[in-house]
Image: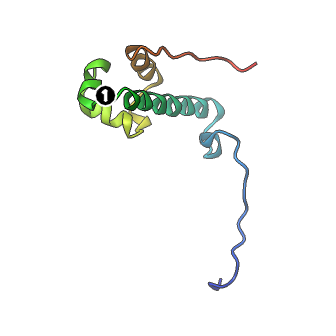
Amino acid sequence: MRKNEARKEAIIESSGNVFSDLGFDDAEAQVLALRADLMAMLAKQLKDQNMTQVHASKVLGVSQSRVSDLTRGKTEKFSLDMLVTFAARLGKPARIELSP
């Protein structure tokens, strides 16, 4: 293809869950999306409370490097269960609702 030719690419509308779009089965995609969303909310809480990673590590009961993993969005390093525990330790209990 020449540089001046327009590239024709198919645009596929998102399903609303990036993990589904990447090919994960529905159940796993939902868990991955929940983990990613909860991690983002927890990182926001830490930032909103102006917590240093050292202080956050004491509140959450983990090492500072684990807090760094959390704030950097390393979802593969945290279970949903652990993230729910972190939320509770921050005084922000997590809740899961089923769709109607």
- 58 left or right of 72 in image: left
Q: Is residue 98 above or below residue 18?
A: above
Q: Which residue is mark 1?
A: 51
The residue sitting at 63% across, 36% down in the picture is 25
Q: Is residue 61 left or right of residue 24?
A: left
Picture coordinates of residue 45, whole percent (x, y): 42, 27
17 or 47, which lies in front?
Answer: 47
How many labels were placed on the picture? 1
Up-down relation of residue 18 to residue 94 (above or below): below
Dot 1 falls on a residue whose secondary structure is: loop
**Residue at left 29%, top 18%?**
59
Q: Residue at point 53% right, 32% down?
A: 37
- From the image, which quarter does the C terminus lie in? top right
Q: Position of residue 40 (x, y in %)?
A: 47, 33
Quadrant in which residue 5 is drawn: bottom right
- Whether residue 84 sits left or right of residue 3 in the image: it is left
* Amino acid marked by disc 1: Met
Image quarter hosting the N terminus: bottom right
> Where in the figure is residue 22, as x and y percent of width and height?
60, 46
Is 43 in front, or is 20? 43
